Amino acid sequence: QINEKALELLQAHPEGVRWSEMLKLLQEAFPDFHPKTINGTVWKLLEKYPDTVEKPEKGLFRLKKKQA
């Protein structure tokens, strides 16, 4: 659930989403989840979706651009 929402947020923000903003938006979407669960899920986005998510600079997550 959290991963799906995180990917939706990244699709909605092609310029990328900062770490703190991502945590805030996910905590608003999933108030029943413990904040550390959300934190850990965001932390592992790159590990879980290496072909989809990139971190071009510290604290910024975005979807990789598709190669033409």
Image (tube, helix red, strand yellow):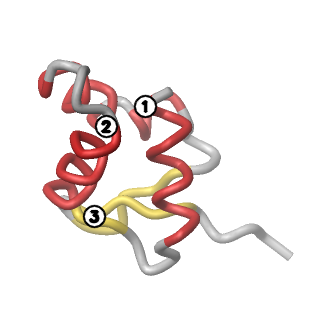
First reached walking from the N terminus: tag 3 or tag 2: 2
In-image side of 34 versus 1 (left or right): left
Q: Residue at point 49% right, 43% down?
A: 5
Between tags 3 and 2, which lies in front?
A: 2
Q: Badge 1: how crowded within 10 Å, few (<14), some, or many (20+)?
A: some
Which numbered disc, 1 or 2, marks the residue that appears first in the sequence? 1
Q: Is residue 39 above or below residue 14?
A: above
Does 44 sit left or right of 27 as displayed? right
Residue occupying the point 27% across, 53% down: 25
The disc placed on residue 11 is: none
The residue that label 3 is drawn on is 60
Q: Position of residue 43 (x, y in %)?
A: 27, 34
Badge 2: few (under 14), some or many (20 or more) residues near its Cα, within 10 Å? many
Which residue matches tag 1? 2
- SS for dot 1: helix
- Looking at numbered disc 2 in the image, what kind of residue is underneath it? Val
Residue at 44% in and 80% down: 15
Count the labels in the image: 3
Are the residues flagged by discs 1 and 2 in contact, CB closer than 8 Å?
yes
Looking at the rendering, which quadrant does residue 44 occupy?
top left
Q: Nearer the viewer, mark 3 or mark 1?
A: 1
Residue 45: x and y in percent read 42, 37
Q: Position of residue 8 (x, y in %)?
A: 55, 53
Residue found farthest to the bottom: 15
Seen in the picture, residue 52 relative to 39 is either above or below; the reply is below
**Mark 2 lies on residue:** 42
The quadrant of the rendering that contains the C terminus is bottom right
Separation of marks 1 and 2 at Cα, in angstroms: 8 Å
